[in-house]
Image (tube, grey):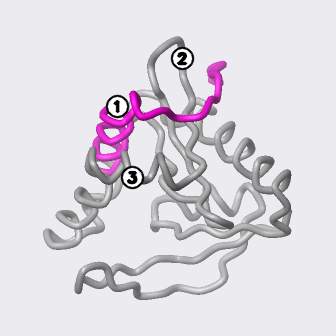
Amino acid sequence: MNITATIERVSLNDTVEISDLIINNASLYLRSHYSDAQWSIFKSYYSIETIRQKIQKQQMFCAKLGSVIVGTIALDQDYIVGFYTHVAYVNKGIGSKLLRYIENEAQQIGHPEIYLASSPVGLDFYLKFGWQIVEELEIDYLGVPFVETIMKKRL
């Protein structure tokens, strides 16, 4: 079932709602893939203060149903980051709409290809939309290793 949501630029007023959405989604879908140290770093990476900073540095968008944020995605240079859907709206077309939107945004500003780092949970979703696996990396965040799959898509 697809839901009609509007996509708009995130504002600083959305900071708390975005942080909560991301951490709630990750608690359900990603937590089992992370050690306690990784989870602690993940939560700080998407804390209210960090989201506030990201809003000012990245092209960050959200999907809304009325005034409720049901998904978020951002473009940082040629990298898609912070892509999460509200847990109550997973598998309802919100993620697909956000991904197509950000791909179009990236193309309009002149990126010939874009990248993202996928968790194991997201791989099949991205492959379905024509993304290709580039490599699997171990990336160090604050002294703690995270394994991420780097993907790209030619626009």
Q: Determine whether the residue tagged by mark 1 lies in a helix, strand or loop.
A: helix
Q: Residue type at mark 1: give it.
A: Glu
Gap between marks 3 and 1 measured at Cα:
15 Å
Gap between marks 1 and 2 measured at Cα:
13 Å
Q: Residue type at mark 2: give it.
A: Leu
| Quadrant occupied by the C terminus | bottom right
Question: Where is mark 3, residue-wise?
Answer: 53
Residue 42, by quadrant, is bottom left
Query: How far across and down, in percent of the image, does residue 59 sit?
Result: 60, 49
Q: Determine whether the residue tagged by mark 2 lies in a helix, strand or loop.
A: strand
Of mark 1 and mark 2, the one earlier in the sequence is 1
Left or right: 120, with 142 as reference point:
right
Q: Magenta span covers which residues?
A: 1-26
Question: Where is mark 1, residue-wise?
Answer: 17
Q: Residue type at mark 3: give it.
A: Gln
Left or right: 106, with 134 as reference point:
right
Residue at the image position 57 percent from the left and 64 percent from the top: 123
Gap between marks 2 and 3 measured at Cα:
25 Å
Question: Where is mark 2, residue-wise?
Answer: 65
| Circle nearer the viewer, 3 or 1 | 3
| Circle nearer the viewer, 2 or 3 | 3
Residue at the image position 23 percent from the left and 59 percent from the top: 44
